[in-house]
Image (cartoon, rainbow, N blue to C red):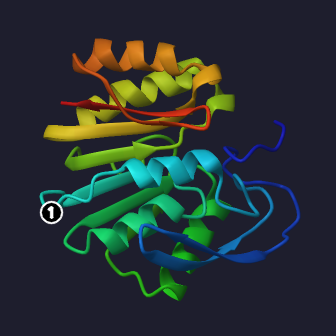
Amino acid sequence: MSDHYYSAQPTSGHNLTEFEIELRGVSLKMTSDAGVFSKNHLDTGTKILIKALPVDPSIHSLLDLGCGYGPIGLIMAKLLPQAEVYMSDINERAVELTRRNAAQNGIANVIIKAGEGFSAFPEPNFDLIVTNPPIRAGKQVIYSLVDEAYQALNPKGRFAAVIMTKQGAKSLEKKMAEVFGNVSEWEKESGYRVVASQK
């Protein structure tokens, strides 16, 4: 199998990179590596998603699905200190980086595990599930995440994803509307859309 950021065990050599990200009043020192998504900087889609997410005191459990090296979940953990933030990725290197980044930024309200899709956290109890999905993995993989997200959410829980308009935003919105019975756009910027549904 060729080496992708959604490979379980990347075979590319290590090339650690350090940089800072600042968003929504939170500043984090991040360490990244070869073999993970957007290894040298915070990508545009992730930035737009983070800016669009609700900072709501009623959120007690959040899942960052496909967390990469951790920017979404770690920023949300800072913004939602009352919440348990669950973070998972199929890529074991990414999971190790997320653990390192949580530790070096003093973030304790996170639970980080390796696993494909929802397998890392099989108990359905989330108030919010967020993802910058692995578009290159294919439409059926993304659609299955929507189906599984519905099952994993608490009543009134929300699912939010960022996607480039030209990479299938409309078809993702259609799928989410079919599964949840509703869909809305939380943000539209720089060719990206943040689409969300509520259970």
Q: Nearer the viewer, residue 132 or 193?
A: 193
Residue placed at 84% from the left, 69% from the top? Answer: 14
Give the image quarter of residue 199.
top left
Query: In the orientation shown, which residue stands out farthest toward the front?
Result: 189
The quarter of the displayed image where residue 107 is located: bottom left
**Residue 36 on image: x %, y %:** 71, 56
Whether residue 164 is visible to the viewer of this picture, yes or no, is yes
* Residue receiving disc 1: 57
- Disc 1 packing (10 Å; few <14; some 14–19; many ≥20): few
Q: Is residue 3 left or right of residue 46?
A: right
Q: Could you tell whether 39 is left or right of 155 in the image?
A: right
Q: Amino acid at mark 1?
A: Pro
In the image, is residue 61 above or below residue 78? above
Q: Position of residue 16 (x, y in %)?
A: 79, 75
Question: What residue do we see at 19% from left, 48% from top?
Answer: 125
Relative to 127, does residue 42 appear above or below in the rendering?
A: below
- Asked whether residue 66 appears in the rendered view, the answer is no
Q: Residue 133's x, y, as percent?
A: 54, 38
Query: Residue at coordinates 76% horizontally, 67% vertically from top-left?
Result: 33
- Quadrant of res 180: top left
Q: Is residue 75 above or below residue 182?
A: below
Q: Quadrant of the N terminus?
A: top right
Q: Position of residue 12 (x, y in %)?
A: 86, 57
Residue situated in front as seen by the camera: 34 or 93: 34
Q: Quick one: SS at disc 1?
A: loop
- Residue 54 or residue 157, whichever sits in front: 54
Compared to 65, does 31 lie above or below? Answer: below
